[in-house]
Amino acid sequence: MHKVFIVIPAYKEENSISSVIKGLKKEGYKDIVVVDDCSPDSTSKKAEDAGAIVLKHIINRGQGASLRTGTDYALRHGAEIIVHFDADGQHNPKEIKDIIKPIIAGKADAALGSRFLGKRSNVPFTKKIVLKLGIMFTFIFSGVWLTDTHNGFRALSRDAAKRIEITQDRMAHASEIIDQIRKKRIRYTEVPVTITYTSYSIEKGQSAMNSIRIAARLIWSKYIR
């Protein structure tokens, strides 16, 4: 049995974090790490009450930094597979077995969730346009063609998690991870996953303008700085 750690970055997720953790526990996952990114609400308490390991940032640093904190913790505690999972209820815990399957079978070291390989995700039209532009940007930026480049549902083998260095503290980490997968020649595959959009998750999501800022930050860090 592989030791699977679930890493959940969380910021102001008091309305959803308990049900997310309970859903993961129902599927048999015990090593659940929630990184509370200095939430001003009761995110930490609700995560602890639901039975998760809670790590706290004393200042708000961003999702990339939270994933790095949680991944480092999981590696120190013997994780063989690390799954990145969202805190807003968009991801389906039943699909974790699917996303870790290629890693367990030795066919890949990184399994990247794609909402576009299947027809199950109710992606809003404007969101779909932004995501499709993100696919083209990632291809230009990293030379990797994927069907979904900004999906927070992914799984990494221990070796891949150790080799991928997340330096982008905020949302640019998603493109950075793909860039490092290419640079370090990490074996990867895409896996169909379901993303369930609700009014809550859409409100919490990234705006088109913020996506432009993310792209500019990546270009600056890679080619100009």
Image: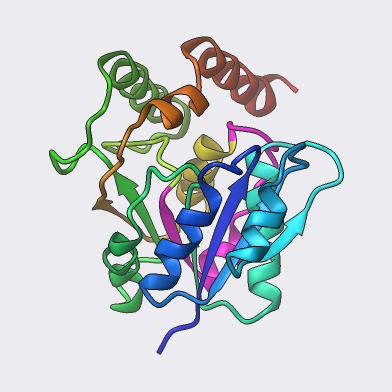
**Does residue 27 appear left or right of residue 122 in this picture?**
right
Residue at 15% of width from left, 43% of height from top?
Answer: 118
**What segment is highlighted magenta in the picture?**
153-172
Q: Is residue 157 visible?
A: yes
Residue sitting farthest toward the right:
58
Front-most of residues 88 and 146: 88
Front-most of residues 188 and 122: 122
Residue at 56% of width from left, 16% of height from top?
Answer: 210
Residue 123, located in which quarter of the rendered image?
top left
The answer to whether residue 183 is magenta is no
Q: Position of residue 214 (x, y in %)?
A: 58, 22
Q: Position of residue 167 (x, y in %)?
A: 70, 42
Residue 103, located in which quarter of the rendered image?
bottom left
Question: What is the quadrant of the C terminus in the image?
Answer: top right
Residue sitting farthest toward the top:
209
Q: Position of residue 163 (x, y in %)?
A: 60, 61
Question: What is the quadrant of the N terminus in the image?
Answer: bottom left
Residue at 18% of width from left, 42% of height from top?
Answer: 117
